[in-house]
Structure formats: C-alpha cells, structure tokens
Amino acid sequence: MIELDKQGYTNITSELVDLSDNSLLGLETFQTATKMQGNWKKGDDYANLTNAIQEAIDKSLVTFKSKF
C-alpha cells in the first residue's frame, strides 16, 4: 500500500427532482478535503482517519446547508 497524502475526503451530491415528471430541478456537488492529524493507521479503529473523514463530512454539510 502506498500513502499518497494524509487527508480525509468527501464528495456529497444532492439532486432535487420533481416527482410529477421526474425533471431535475437542482444539482449540487460538494467536495471537501481535510488534513489528517498523525498516521492514518493509528489504533485498531483508525481514529485519525475516521476523524479526518468526519471533519470533511461536517464541512461539506455546513456548505450544503448554507446554499439553501
């Protein structure tokens, strides 16, 4: 395994569809990367990796909520 970088990534896509005719009313995609603190393999539960991914998710959700 090769470590390319130490970041947590998320890619969140939201689609708003009119169910009466299945037309696409809106489409938003949010991509976020956050730096990982320490080695991603630390511990049995990969706490550093989990925390970086959760932080990226949280940042994407804040961005998503600010759009509406």
Image (tube, rainbow, N blue to C red):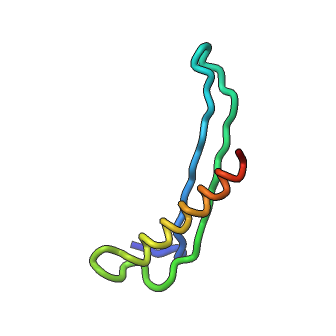
- Say above or below: 59 vs 13: below
The N terminus: image quadrant? bottom left
Q: Quadrant of residue 28?
A: top right
Q: In the image shown, does 40 or 52 lie closer to the viewer? A: 52
The C terminus: image quadrant? top right
Residue 39: x, y in percent? 43, 83
- Say above or below: 65 vs 48: above
In this image, 10 relative to 31: left or right? Answer: left
Q: In the image shown, does 58 or 37 lie closer to the viewer? A: 58
Question: Which residue is found at the position 57% from the left and 50% from the top?
Answer: 12
Pick out the residue farthest to the right: 67
Question: Which residue is found at the position 64% from the left and 52% from the top?
Answer: 30
Question: Which residue is found at the position 63% from the left and 58% from the top?
Answer: 62
Pick out the residue farthest to the bottom: 38
- Say above or below: 33 vs 26: below
- Say above or below: 32 vs 41: above
Q: Quadrant of residue 61?
A: bottom right
Residue 46: x, y in percent? 35, 75
Question: Which residue is found at the position 60% from the left and 66% from the top?
Answer: 33
Pick out the residue farthest to the left: 44
In this image, 52 relative to 67: left or right? Answer: left
Looking at the rendered structure, the number of numbered marks drawn on it comes to 0
Residue 11: x, y in percent? 57, 53
